[in-house]
Image (tube, grey):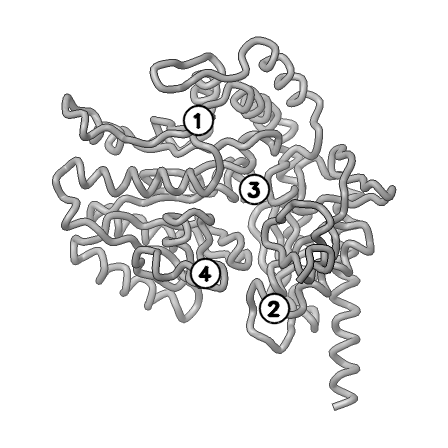
Amino acid sequence: MKKAEVKGSSYPIWHPYTQMYTHEPPIKIVKGDGTTLYTEAGDRFIDAISSWWVNIHGHAHPYVAKKIYEQASSLEHVIFAGFTHDPAQDLCQKLLKILPDNQAYFFFSDNGSTAVEVGLKMAFQYFYNRGEAEKRNKVIAFHDAYHGDTFGAMSVSGRSAFTDPFSKYLFDVEYLPLPLGENKSTCFEQLERLVATQEVAAFIFEPLVQGAGGMNMYAPEDLDRMIAICQSNDVICIADEVMTGFGRTGKYFASLYLENQPDIMCLSKGLTAGFLPMSLTTCTPQIYEAFLSEDKLKTFFHGHSYTANPIACAAAIASYEILTDPAYQNRIQEICDQQAAFKAEMAEHASIKNTRVRGTIVALEFQTGEETGYLNNKRDQIYNFCLERGVLLRPLGNVLYCMPPYCISDEELKKVHDCMRELADQWTAAIFKQTVKS
C-alpha cells in the first residue's frame, strides 16, 4: 500500500492511542487559554478533561508561564547526579506540606509510567538490599488497573487489549477485584491469603479512582483496610496518584482520605500544571534508609537525562502556589459540589447504567448492550457528539467522564453538563426507537 493511500498519514507523526489507518486527520490546535482550545479553523472547545488530566489550572496560565521564563533565563538544566539546585529543593520542601506525613524523600523522573517504574524498583530493591529478594518476589494489583505503558507499569496493569501484544514479556501479578458490592469479601479474603505467604513485595493501586480502567471508584475505608493488612505483613504499599493527585478527588491527594498511608507514592500529570513533563516518586524514611550503605551495590541505580529539570521544577512550584491558595481551594470545593449535584441528577436516567463521582471527577456509564470497556463500539459516537457541541470529552469506551481544569467557570461547567445530559436524552430516544423496531 502506498503511503499516500493510508488515511491520516499525510504528515510523519504517529499519534498515541490512535489507529492511524482509519482515524480522521487530527484537529490542529493553535492556542489555549484557560479552559478553551482554539483550532486552526476557528472552532473552540472547552477542554473538560484537562488534556489527559494534566492542565489543572487551564491552558497558558500566565503566572506559570512567567515563572518558566524567569527560570529559563538563569538555569535551564544541569545534571542531577552530584549536583542540585534551588528549584528542586524548594519544590520538595513545599510538597512536604501537603503530602501525607510519612512521605519524606523524593525521586525525580519524567512521567507517570516512569514514576511507577521507580516505585516498583524501589520496592523490589528494598527487599534485595535486605537479603530477601528470593522470598519477596510477588506484586498484587487490581483488575482493570492502569499504571502506564512501560514494561513494569504494563505488568502491574490489568491485562487488556493494551497489553496483549506484550503479554509474554510481562512479569506475573496477583490480581484482586475492586472491593465493591459482592466482590468485597472476595477481595479481602484473597488479599489475606496472598500476604500470609510472606512472598509479596508490593501492593500497587490507584487510590479511590481507577482512571483509564473506566473511572471505577471505591471507598476509602476499604482501601484503608487493605493497606493495614499489607503493612502488617511487611508488604510495601504503592499509591499511584499520577491521576488522583493535586486536588482531583477534592483533597490534595486521594491518600489523604486514608488513616493508613502508603509507603511509596507516584506523582505526575498535575504536578507541573501541564506545562512540562516531570514526575516524582516519594517514599518513607524506612524505604530510603534501606539503600544507605557503604556497599555501593545497594545504590538505587536509576536516573533520567532530564531528572529534576529546573524549568519543570519552576512550573511545579508555580502550580503549587496557585493550588494552595485558600480562595482557589474554595473554588475546587465548588466544582466538587457541582459535580456531585450533576451525578445525583443523572443517577436515575434511563440511558445511564451507573453514575460515579469523587471530588472534581464525575462519570456516566451509558447503557449499550455491550460489555463496558475502552474499545466499546459506542466510544466514537459519544466523542464526536460532544466535539460537535464544542466540548472535549474523551470517553473511556461507554464511560463518559468530566475532569475539568479548576479555572472552569460555572457557565462553562453548565455547558459541559448540558452536553452530557443532551447525549443521555438522545441516547434514550435512540434506544426506544430500536425497541419499537424490534
Residue annotated with mark 4: 144
Q: CA distance from mark 1 to mark 4?
A: 32 Å
Query: Is there CB contact under 8 Å for labels 1 and 4?
Result: no
First of labels 4, 2 by sequence position? 4
Q: Which mark is residue 248?
A: 3
How packed is label 3: few (under 14 Cα within 10 Å), some, or many (20 or more)? Answer: many
Q: What is the residue that sits farthest to the right in this orientation?
A: 42
Residue at 79% in and 69% down: 426
Residue 353 point in image, percent of width and height = 61, 70
Residue 223 point in image, percent of width and height = 38, 52
How packed is label 2: few (under 14 Cα within 10 Å), some, or many (20 or more)? Answer: some
Residue 280 point in image, percent of width and height = 43, 32
* Residue 383 appears in the figure: no
Q: Nearer the viewer, residue 12 or 100?
A: 12
Q: Nearer the viewer, residue 232 or 288?
A: 288
Query: Is there CB contact under 8 Å for labels 3 and 4?
Result: no
Residue at 64% in and 72% down: 367
Residue annotated with mark 2: 376
1 vs 4, front mark: 1
Tell me which amino acid carries mark 1: Ser
Residue annotated with mark 1: 305
Tell me which amino acid carries mark 2: Asn
Residue at 85% in and 45% down: 43
Q: CA distance from mark 4 to mark 2?
A: 15 Å
Q: CA distance from mark 3 to mark 4?
A: 20 Å
First of labels 3, 1 by sequence position? 3
Q: CA distance from mark 2 to mark 1?
A: 39 Å
2 vs 3, front mark: 2
Q: Secondary structure at mark 2?
A: loop
Q: What is the residue that sits farthest to the left in this orientation?
A: 131
Tell me which amino acid carries mark 4: Asp
